[in-house]
Amino acid sequence: MERAKEILIYLKDKIVAGCKFLWKHIKRGFKKLRRWFRRYIRRLIRHTKEKDYSLLIYTIIAIVLFILFIVLIGKLFSHKNKDKEKTTTEITTEATTEDPAVAAQNQLISQANTIYQNNSSFMVLVNSTHPLQDGYAFEQYTLNCGEIIDSRIHTDLVNMLEACNDAGHEYAIVSGYRNKAKQQTDYDDTVATYIGQGMTQEEAEAEASKYVQKPGYSEHETGLALDIAGLGYTSLDESLASDETVVWLMNNCYNYGFIVRYPSDKTAVTGISYEPWHFRYVGVEAATFMHDNNLSLEEFYQLIGM
Ligand SMILES: [Zn+2]
């Protein structure tokens, strides 16, 4: 205890002595500076009186440079602070303006993923870059008209067609499931028709692929797609967009799990011309989601990152 006290007293004495020493030297330094300054001023006055202005000019230059230096340092600091403020404001603005949009998009993606998980067996993507898997099979159901569909969509299809009838419209099922051989025949026939109209093989194939897909690339091979027109239709073309039966189906099909697979505003995404008659089953939940968010099947897949 005694020893510790002694050490403390010793340290205190040393610190006090150090401070006194420092203060003495600072005072001495100030005195020297004051003396130098007085001498300098006297010299300046004397020189000016003798009309020697060189010292005065140097002094003015030195003062101006000093002021400039101070201003520069000041600006540099205020700039840094402004940058800091700006970044803070930017972050706050970004946070307030972007968050709701990002949150909404994330919610949409998560909703789409859930829908896909619940309906994946109905959501198979078939287009010019996604051929149907080899050996794709399903339980077939033959409709009264002779067309074949995937048996799982039968109830929803019947409900939709009955509702269409109830609304006062008569329909004709033009085409349901097509096997590979039938798809090949349809494709070859279409190409032959275009060649008959004077197109080259290449031109005819390009034109045909806008309407009929090569075997393995058509939705009709899944049993989930149907071409439906108004009763008494003459051909499958864009005029069907104003056919009252087709209009009713286009407006209501999502309630029964069907989507208008090739809409007029999505040709760039689907790669297929407008086909108001082509309905594709994806399930009620998915069809409603795509209808409400104006998404094609391709865009739905983009949304879930597949
Ligand atoms: Zn079709």
Image (spheres, rainbow, N blue to C red):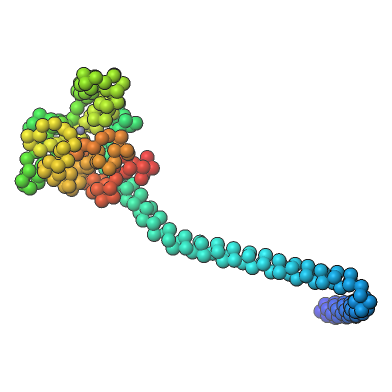
In the image, is 62 to the left or to the right of 39? left
Q: Position of residue 71 (x, y in %)?
A: 71, 69
* Quadrant of res 165: top left
Quarter of the image where the N terminus is located: bottom right
Please give the name of the residue rendered at 36% of the width and 45% of the height, measured from the top-left corner. 303
Point out the residue furthest to the front here: 51
Please give the name of the residue rendered at 34% of the width and 52% of the height, measured from the top-left corner. 108
* Residue 36, placed above or below residue 274: below
In the foreground, 209 or 63: 63
Q: Position of residue 113 (x, y in %)?
A: 33, 47
Residue 40 makes an appearance in the image? no
Please give the name of the residue rendered at 16% of the width and 47% of the height, measured from the top-left corner. 252
Residue 96 makes an appearance in the image? yes
Q: Position of residue 207 (x, y in %)?
A: 27, 27
In the image, is 47 to the left or to the right of 180? right
In the image, is 300 to the left or to the right of 87? left
